[in-house]
Image: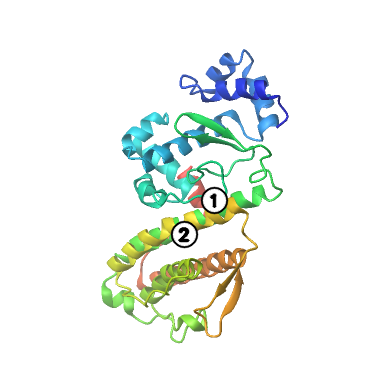
Amino acid sequence: MTFGRDRLRELLDAVLDENNATLERMAQHAYASQWHFSRTFAVGTGESPVALRRRVMLERAAWQLRHGSSVTDAAFAAGYDSVEGFARAFARAYGYPPSEAARVLGTGRRDPGAPAPVDHWLPAPNGVHFHPPTNLWVEEDGRRSTAPDYPAAEVLAQMVQHDLADTRYLLERATELDDDERDRIRFPGLVVLEWDGPEESVSRVLGNLVRAKEMWLASMAGADHPEDSDNGIDSLTVRFEDVAPRWVETIRDIHRRGAWGDVLIDALCDPPESFVLGGVVAHVLTFAAHRRQLARHMMRAVGLDVDHGDPLDWNRSSS
């Protein structure tokens, strides 16, 4: 931080006061022009006043949801005009809808030795976070969030969230096909990864798209690998909605701990193999993108009019 503690406190008070929902009100509270207030705050914290307020309010909402608040109450407490707008913002930030927060964050997991609960924290360039029940937590040196790779972490978050949103879209579109069309061989002999077997149909491609996350999460947790389950569309959708928030929370946990270089030794492989966690995430995202496009090609062959899965289009529609 470039501010003294008292001045930082004053600026944060101006940003986070319950009555200061707009930049104009924040600046008035700090007795400054909007331009000067925004510039001074952004230079000192690496985040605009509005962005910091939005992030901290979402962190508070996540904590409230974890402790039994309804989505409606959390939405209006966070300053949103509608539950729908809050749900979109929450899902974009956390990678899963607010209705899942209690289940995903309800484990009470903590970073080893961490002095504060951080399950609800989002990436921040300044170490400023919501600290329950009504306080802020300012990390002393901001090492988690001011590292040189912070922008890269933002890009990764976009990629992870787009992958899940796009998979959900494809599963929904697949319901427009009957069982025979989903199971029909479209690309005979197609193999993406040899250990996953042939992926010649929509069902098989979507099944492996979901199963890859299930498999890697099991490896990270030291659990048995899941069986090659039913790829019926209803079953597959249920499995996806279970694995998606766990996948996001695992990646957030790796980032919080700075554990991208940690090595996973998968004793369930024959013979056992070692994998770097950063490489695992890159692997899953790479082949997920490939399979999502394969599924599109197959759906178009059936006659479905599907989009291109472009992250730019997703970004515009979700903003």
Q: Nearer the viewer, residue 25 or 143?
A: 143
Drawn side of residue 23 relative to residue 84, left or right: right
Q: Which residue is mark 2?
A: 247
Residue 246 in view of the camera: yes
Answer with mark 2 or mark 1, whichever residue precedes in sequence. 1
Residue drawn where x is 59% and y is 65% of the image? 277
Q: Which residue is mark 1?
A: 111
Mark 1 is on which residue type?
Asp
Residue 198: where, in percent of width, then height? 44, 83
Residue 280: where, in percent of width, then height? 57, 67
Residue 162 in view of the camera: no
| Rendering quarter of residue 74 | top left
Mark 2 is on which residue type?
Trp
Drawn side of residue 269 relative to residue 182, left or right: right
| Rendering quarter of residue 98 | top left
Give the structural element (helix, strand or loop) at label 2.
Answer: helix
Q: Nearer the viewer, mark 2 or mark 1?
A: 1
Q: Nearer the viewer, residue 33 or 276?
A: 276
Residue drawn where x is 52% and y is 78% of the image? 267
Q: Which coloring applies here?
A: rainbow
**Image quarter of the N terminus:** top right
Residue 291: where, in percent of width, then height? 48, 70
Q: Nearer the viewer, residue 275 or 111?
A: 111
Q: Which mark is residue 139?
A: none
Drawn side of residue 174 relative to residue 282, left or right: left
Instruction: Indicate whether 38 appears above or below 167.
Output: above
CB under 8 Å between discs 2 and 1 = no
Instruction: Indicate whether 180 appears above or below 139.
Output: below
